[in-house]
């Protein structure tokens, strides 16, 4: 849907793009990607505070990964709606069973996925001792 998060990206420290806001709102920060366009090789991002939009060429992006979000759970990008609901239910059930903080797990998923360059859900399912 329009306005959904399509992924996350980290921009270069000297990134140059198009925004009515100051570039320091985006530079070297992890931003939510509203659109990742492979055809035009560009990304539309919202800054971490959710107060500014910016458009950047992909050569201004250090790393990114694609994902979807449902009920606050980051999900793989290639699931159909029913598979996404099942995935979210599995993550939430595991989280409750392991007494995990979902916002902390979401941050771990973002960090590991950015490091890998693709969606990585290991933090959702690893035991707490391994994280």
Image (spheres, rainbow, N blue to C red):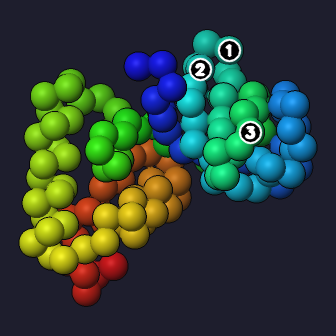
Query: Label 2, on which residue?
Result: 37
**Residue at coordinates 17% horizontally, 57% vertically from top-left?**
92
**How packed is label 2: few (under 14 Cα within 10 Å), some, or many (20 or more)?**
few
Measuring from the top left, give residue 1's x and y in whole percent.
41, 19
Query: Label 1, on which residue?
Result: 40
Q: Earlier in the sequence, mark 2 or mark 3?
A: 2
Q: Secondary structure at mark 3?
A: loop
Query: Label 3, on which residue?
Result: 52
Label 2, label 3: how many angstroms apart (C-alpha)?
19 Å
Q: Kindly indicate the quadrant of the structure image that contains residue 84.
A: top left
Confirm or deny contact between disc 2 and disc 1 (CB under 8 A).
yes
**How packed is label 3: few (under 14 Cα within 10 Å), some, or many (20 or more)?**
some
For the C terminus, give its image quadrant: bottom left
**Residue at coordinates 19% horizontally, 46% vertically from top-left?**
88
Query: Where 98 falls versus 48 (above or below)?
Result: below
Q: Is residue 24 left or right of residue 127?
A: right
Q: Is residue 28 left or right of residue 79?
A: right
Q: Earlier in the sequence, mark 3 or mark 1?
A: 1
Q: Secondary structure at mark 2?
A: strand
Measuring from the top left, give residue 22's x and y in whole percent.
90, 43
Measuring from the top left, give residue 70's x and y in whole percent.
30, 40
Q: Nearer the viewer, residue 68 or 57?
A: 68
Query: Where 71 falls versus 36 (above or below)?
Result: below
Label 2, label 1: how many angstroms apart (C-alpha)?
6 Å
Measuring from the top left, give residue 41's x and y in whole percent.
67, 22
Q: Nearer the viewer, residue 20 or 30?
A: 20
Label 3, label 1: how many angstroms apart (C-alpha)?
21 Å
Q: Kindly indicate the quadrant of the structure image that contains residue 20.
A: top right
Q: Kindly indicate the quadrant of the structure image that contains residue 13.
A: bottom right
**How packed is label 1: few (under 14 Cα within 10 Å), some, or many (20 or more)?**
few
């Amino acid at each position: 849907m329009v306005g959904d998060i399509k992924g996350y990206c980290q921009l270069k420290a000297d990134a140059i793009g198009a925004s009515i806001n100051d570039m320091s709102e985006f530079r070297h920060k992890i931003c939510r990607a509203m659109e990742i366009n492979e055809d035009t090789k560009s990304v539309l991002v919202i800054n971490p505070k959710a107060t500014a939009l910016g458009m950047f060429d992909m050569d201004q992006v250090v790393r990114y990964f694609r994902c979807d979000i449902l009920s606050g759970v980051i999900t793989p990008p290639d699931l159909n709606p029913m598979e996404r609901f099942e995935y979210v239910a599995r993550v939430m059930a595991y989280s409750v069973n392991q007494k995990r903080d979902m916002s902390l797990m979401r941050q771990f998923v973002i960090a590991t996925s950015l490091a890998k360059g693709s969606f990585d859900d290991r933090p959702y399912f690893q035991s707490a001792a391994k994280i």
